[in-house]
Amino acid sequence: MSDVACCRLPVLGITPFNPVNGDTRFFVLRLPRPSEPAWWRWRPGQFVMLRPDSFGLELPWGRPFCICHVTDGCLICFFQVLGRGTRRIAAIKPGDMVSLWGPLGNGFAMEADTPTLLLAGGMGIAPFVGYVNVHPKIWNVTMLFGHREIQEYYPVNNINEFIPLDGFLEHGPEDLQLFVDTVHERMRLCAEQKGLVLACGPLPFLRTVRDFARALKVRTQLSLESVMACGVGACLGCVTKTDQTWPVPEKRGRPVQICRDGPVFWADQVVI
Ligand SMILES: Cc1cc2nc3c(=O)[nH]c(=O)nc-3n(C[C@H](O)[C@H](O)[C@H](O)COP(=O)(O)OP(=O)(O)OC[C@H]3O[C@@H](n4cnc5c(N)ncnc54)[C@H](O)[C@@H]3O)c2cc1C
Ligand code: FES
């Protein structure tokens, strides 16, 4: 917690990612200068809790968002308009004030010399924008991306700039099967190379990746999502259960908080 900054900031901008019809947006916040030390040490896979003043009394809790990137003193997040909170966030105007807690959680492993396969489903692409920006040996990183909306709704260019990204647009069951088969094949190759797999996306996708990880014995981390309230381990609103391989024996088979102990977990250490 000592490494978490809490601040009130003006929003620089909320940018519709797709000007045509999309419900995805970037928001950009200027961090305090000199930035809080917490922000010097941010890691891709960490997240923030954001609560705009416009939530008023109706929405008491902030909303969690992966950190897409921190650059030039600015925090960038990428989000999809889903419900009441994200609708209000999308309506923020430059200069409106928000409260921000972060960086929160643990972040993904980054091993410069290890072949690393990134697997993203839909909005799960968000943390990998920062990941490919800060990875020191980016030629060791590849990515598969499964999505239901057209690619233009997602920040694929911010990743394509650094690494090859294979996208799979899902229209129906055959497309999904092709994506799943490709994920399996690429995880198999990764296992042969003693590589690392990192995945972020919807729960059914993460379960599939977890099953492949177990069968292929490839080191795999999953970024879990949950509805969150406090975001800092105080409300027990985001628990998941540890598996029998959890490193602390007395905590095996017990609840852990996704916001405090995650959101990134080794695939074999939690029950999802
Ligand atoms: C660690 C973490 C990182 C996240 N990063 C991002 C991100 O980078 N970009 C992004 O667009 N979203 C992200 N999310 C999800 C995002 O927080 C939710 O979409 C948002 O809180 C919804 O708020 P709302 O008030 O608009 O929706 P609500 O009105 O609260 O809910 C609308 C619907 O969305 C469902 N929902 C709410 N929260 C979640 C959730 N966390 N996961 C799945 N379904 C949910 C509700 O059950 C309901 O059906 C992240 C969530 C977590 C926990
Ligand atoms: S959101 Fe409160 S404990 Fe995780």
Image: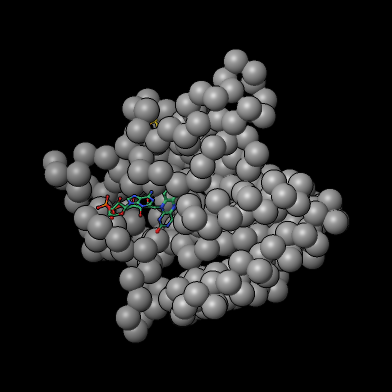
At horizontal 55% and vertical 53% (from top left) the residue drawn is 206
Is 254 located above or below residue 187 in the figure?
above
Pick whichever, 116 or 134, lies toward us. Answer: 116
Pick whichever, 79 or 187, lies toward us. Answer: 187
At horizontal 41% and vertical 65% (from top left) the residue drawn is 26
The picture places residue 83, in percent across and down from the top left corner, at 25, 57
Task: Say whether residue 58 is left or right of residue 264.
Answer: left
Residue furthest left as drawn: 57
The picture places residue 156, in percent across and down from the top left corner, at 56, 73
Task: Say whether residue 222 is left or right of residue 117.
Answer: left
Which corner quadrant of the image does residue 245 belong to?
top right
- Count the numbered circles shown: 0
Residue furthest top as drawn: 250
Pick whichever, 85 or 201, lies toward us. Answer: 201
The picture places residue 106, in percent across and down from the top left corner, at 57, 38
The picture places residue 131, in percent across and down from the top left corner, at 63, 56
At horizontal 33% and vertical 47% (from top left) the residue drawn is 63
Which corner quadrant of the image does residue 162 belong to?
bottom right
Display colour scheme: one colour
Q: Is residue 159 visible?
A: no
Task: Say whether residue 124 is left or right of residue 49.
Answer: right
Q: Ligand 2 is found in which quarter of the picture? A: top left
Is 180 located above or below residue 73 in the figure?
below
Q: Is residue 101 visible?
A: yes
At horizontal 59% and vertical 31% (from top left) the residue drawn is 243
